[in-house]
Image (tube, grey):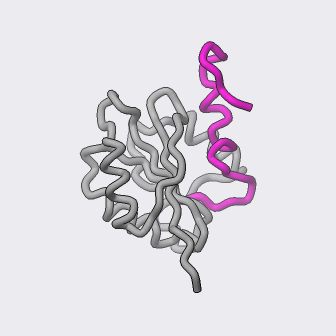
Amino acid sequence: MSATAGGPEGTATQSAGSRLGFKSGMVVQELGWDEDADDDLRMAIEDAIDADMVDGEYGNVVDSVVLWWRDDDGDLVDALVDALTDLVSGGVIWLLCPKVGRPGAVDPADIAEAAPVAGLATTTTMAVSKEWSATRLVAPKTPR
């Protein structure tokens, strides 16, 4: 199912958890939450995993990380490295940033520069709500 312009308001958010690849039983860690975070998007993710997201104090491995990030939040490389701490091998970080033109928007070039420094590759960027876009970051597979 895809959200289309002209469809019911909120369609993109309602299916966002599934569109981001979240499934029931996954453990998802949420970092960088603040009052401007999209509550409908958060609920869509929690509905998709059929549980609450865990925070930075969880202390165990997680399947995925949702990182809310704004331009003035600090050093993105440091935040991405920190997000890797509890992430299971093969896990995904979803970097959620305000859309271009919104307060706190992050320049896509900044994400493209920060990801490889943190040991990550950018794979996909999509709109996930009216105010937020999501960039999928993964650790490149290395031969062993």
User: Which is more toward the observer, 45 or 88?
Assistant: 88
Check the picture and name the quadrant holding the C terminus: bottom right
Left or right, 14 with reference to 81: right
Q: Position of residue 91 (x, y in %)?
A: 59, 65
Q: Residue furthest bottom?
A: 144
Q: Position of residue 62 (x, y in %)?
A: 59, 67
Q: Would you identify the image quadrant in which residue 114 lies?
A: bottom left
Residue 103 versus residue 55 in the image, above or below: above
Q: Residue at x 67, y 50 (%)?
A: 21
Q: Residue at x 66, y 16 (%)?
A: 7
Q: Residue furthest top?
A: 6
Check the picture and name the quadrant holding the N terminus: top right
Left or right, 77 with reference to 53: left
Q: Position of residue 13 (x, y in %)?
A: 60, 32
**The magenta stretch spans which residues?**
1-29
Q: Position of residue 81 (x, y in %)?
A: 38, 68
User: Which is more toward the observer, 8 or 49?
Assistant: 8
